[in-house]
Amino acid sequence: MTISIWRYSHLTLAISSFVFILLASVTGIILAFEPILEQIQPYKMADLDTLSLSETITVFKDTYPEVIALEVDANEFVLASVITAEGESLSGYFNPQTAVFLGEKPEPSTFFQFVTNLHRSLFLKSTGRFLVGFCSFLLFLISISGAILVLQRQRGFKKFFAKIVNENFSQYWHVVLGRWSLIPIIIITVTGVYLSLEKFDVFPNIKSSHEVAYETIAATPVVSVNNFPAFQEVKLSELSSVEFPFSDDVEDYYTVELEDRALLVNQFTGEILSEVQSPLTSVLSRLSIQLHTGKGSIVWSLILAVATINILFFIYSGFVMTFKRRQSRIKNKFTKNSSTFVILVGSENGSTLVFANALKEQLMASGHSVFLSELNAYATYKNVEHVIVMTSTYGEGEAPVNATNFLNLLNTVPQDKSYSFSVVGFGSLAYPEFCKFAFDIDASLQEQGKQQLLPVCTINDKSFSSFEQWVGLWSKAVGLTIVVPSSSLDVKPKHLKEFKVISVTAPKDNPDDTFKIVLKPNKRLQFTSGDLLAIYPKNDYQERLYSIGKLHGALHLSVKLHAQGLGSGYLNALKKDAIFSARIIENKNFHFPKKSSRVVLIGNGTGVLPFLGMLDQNTKNIPTYLYCGLRCQQSYALYENELNASLANGHLAKLHLALSQEQEKVYVQDLLLRDAVFIFETLSMGGTLMICGSLIMYQGVQSVLRQLCEANKTDFESFRHLIKSDCY
């Protein structure tokens, strides 16, 4: 069954049973506190696991002339009915060690009785019990389908509790709380269904009866109750009830009800006259009541309360996600066969569709015919000239829910004319397989012979600035002037922290107009080299991203000052001790490896700085080689001290410097070709290649690596997992 079918089933069940589940959840939360209120009563006087039935019966018989019955309730409070020396009846809670009367059993709370009846039957008697039982079953199905969706999202049981990136409040907590509440909710629903079925006599009513040979009952030898083997072996924690003999007649005996069996015991000799096992239905009924109500355990009652509160949150978050998806529904002015531009979207929760709609509106405002569709609805487009694919990546590099069949359709759906294409990937750098599905689509379209207009653009955490930059590049490539206003996208920054400026160098001191800025977070913050700093120059949601180098606990950036650069100008204008707000974005897929046979770092321009931090981290002296591309020897001065220190302490094995503006123009790609044997050997031995810097340099490095693989008759894709990149 596909994920879309599970999602549809999950949603349908939730909507159809909404009112009953809401009512059952609210009453369930209230009832979860009844066992807690019972447990805090001062009637538990001993550890019943250490106290035997013989000890308790002995002390009661020594204290009272007549004992009628003993009982241990779900809270492990001991109740008894006795006749005192004054001839008065006394019933209630007793101390099982001393037989001291503690207090009468209170009358059930009218409020809790009302809520219990509402919870069990909605005051509709049998009809209500059926509806409640049926809704418990639906909630069970919802839990199972939800668990399957989480398993599919996390790609199996082993990663069921793996980290989830908080990209959307409702979706994030829907999954996180769902994982932790899954088992309690399944227990609540299964026991609820069982108890409902029991009330309708669905299960066989098996009653075990004792068979006693009265003619063989002996009154001798007389044994003290304290020495009855049957009573000595029973702990009070196992006891349900004891009925005492009515008289001294030899045919009267003790009737003992335990959790799993019932005993008849001779009152004189202690002999077991009969023993029968409790029916399975009785055991399951008792267990179901305890698990469903939480009676006898404050901890389990609290777990049930939290799980039931989570059910209310699931109702809320489920409807929020559904409403968001419906808000993002696709509406087209033009048909698929009349449009020259086709935008295909793959989205898990609808957020990617917001970007696609914004682009579609601007294209249509420019007088172009545009058709927007889901990737799974890929069809024949008679007049298409250019296709834009905008897709998120689900789980570990998988297709999102509305794109699972696209790659198959690409191979089977014919097109009347060829078209050019561009692919935009949306995702989070906290996931190792960042935007992998976008790259898979790009590769498949190229294999189909379609013309790639631009390399894959990756957008982290719904960054408007990254999308804005891509729109500028794309519109220039197709000969248009398209601008997507930020007001059309509701994407606001979150998790902002304050940073203090420690130092800023002057860009005029560097021929590349590049400066270094050192920052310290005002509060303790986890980050490492390779992560990203997101700044907001206009104090809005147009962010600019910069790669981080972590040196001596401080955050280092290398920034090229552009004449009209919003981000670079903002950072360059900051003075020492200035405070500003920004946020750290974990770039997990671009961290220095903890273990590797060899590491090759390839960077140019400002992309060199994150490697300075990584070299500082290389305390294990993993053999590390840096191919550093800069314009001239003066450019190198910006990083010279740190690189010399790394060479001196063994953190950097060798530095290869490529200067592109000296008399002999050399680029890092040239050095890689020169050291082709070494680079291919690094890949073959499972080493790591890390690339940081300009996108043009990255494309050149990729081309070189493909050449090396072709020369060695090896598939480049088999090495892709060894290559980490952060380029712009």
Image (spheres, grey):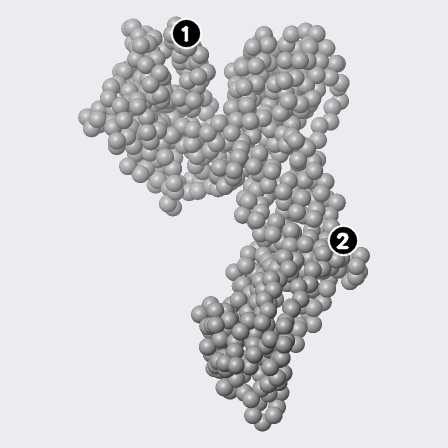
Left or right relative to 114: residue 294: left
Label 1 sits on a secondary structure element that is loop
Quarter the N terminus occupies: top right
State the residue at coordinates (36%, 11%): 669
State the residue at coordinates (49%, 37%): 159
Residue 348 x/y as whole percent: 61, 32
Front residue of 290/41: it is 290
Would you say the residues marked 1 and 2 are in contact, meaning their CB atoms lie under 8 Å apart? no
Left or right relative to 458: residue 609: left
How crowded pointer 2 is (Cα within 10 Å; few <14, some 14-19, many 20+) is rated as some
Quarter the C terminus occupies: top left
Label 2 sits on a secondary structure element that is helix
On the question of residue 605 being in view, the answer is no
Q: Residue flagged by tag 1: what amino acid is it?
A: Lys
Q: What residue is pinned by disc 2? A: 131
Q: Residue flagged by tag 2: what amino acid is it?
A: Leu
